[in-house]
Amino acid sequence: MALLTDGIPNTTESLRVYETEVLSLANVETIDLNAKLGLALDEISYDVLDILLDHARTTDPLALVRRTIGVSDVVVTPQLKRWHALHTLEIVYRDAYNNQLNDRYQSKWNEYRDLAREARDQTVHYGLGLVGTPIPRAAAPTLSSVLGGNASTIYYAQVSWLAANGQEGCPSFVTGTQTPDGSSLVVQPPAAPTVATGWNLYLGLTDTSTVLQNTTALPLGQPFTVSALATGAAPGNGQTGEIWVTGGRSLRRG
């Protein structure tokens, strides 16, 4: 699972799972869906922090520093991802209604407001997942080439950070490049966070087929030169919850 601070949990395409008309609505009403996805993430993050500061039924082990670390150790569970999508749609239809004062938009706004509240309650009931050592999503690597190698090839790459405890963070978004004839791909990892002790490299010939290239953690800052593609495991989705916090202040209604 990605961390809540790794980026927006859903995409505009994810919203279509819940509301098939959302893209056409956004076009007609000139609503920036990416901006609304970001706003919904901000609002949910504030609510999650509020729950953690209250931690009514299960003790937050980092309660004494919670205001300092915020939600940096919270993972995006399926429940939280659903909450984010529904809250985004609530915001979208709220804006559409306020633009047009259209009763149909108001009905949709009310529907998604209720669904988002239900999703919030389910998330809290299931529990907020925390990790003891949060590992942030890696930025994209720098791809280049050196003389000597194979024919021109299009490569797609992802990298992820590894911590001393062996855990792996969420992989970077896929980036691609085409090497010239007679050259080899060189992958330079981005600047590492303080928690990282090594990195993993995933490569593929399409943006959906990247697999692990190294058998042991690669040294920080050291580039990797590709001689031939390995056939390792597919990239994971990041860390999973180790500690679960339930309860928290009830959602304020009205």
Image (cartoon, rainbow, N blue to C red):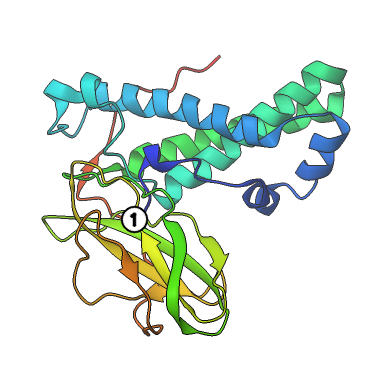
Give the side of residue 5 with respect to residue 88, left or right: left
Residue 238 falls in which quadrant of the image? bottom left
Vertical placement of residue 130 versus 97, above or below: below
Identify which residue, 35 or 223, lies in the foreground: 223
Dot 1: element: loop
Q: Position of residue 83 (x, y in %)?
A: 51, 40
Name the foreground residue: 208 vs 47.
Answer: 208
Q: Is residue 99 visible?
A: yes
Q: Residues within 10 Å of mark 1 (few under 14, many from 20)?
A: many
Is 88 drawn above or below residue 65 in the view shown?
A: below
Q: Position of residue 209 (x, y in %)?
A: 50, 75
User: Which residue bears the numbered disc 1?
Assistant: 189
* Residue at image coords 73%, 22%: 95
- The quadrant in which the N terminus is found is bottom left
**44 or 39: nearer the viewer:** 39
Residue sitting at 48 percent across and 55 percent down?
A: 173
**Amino acid type at image mark 1:** Pro
Query: For residue 226, which quarter of the picture?
Result: bottom left
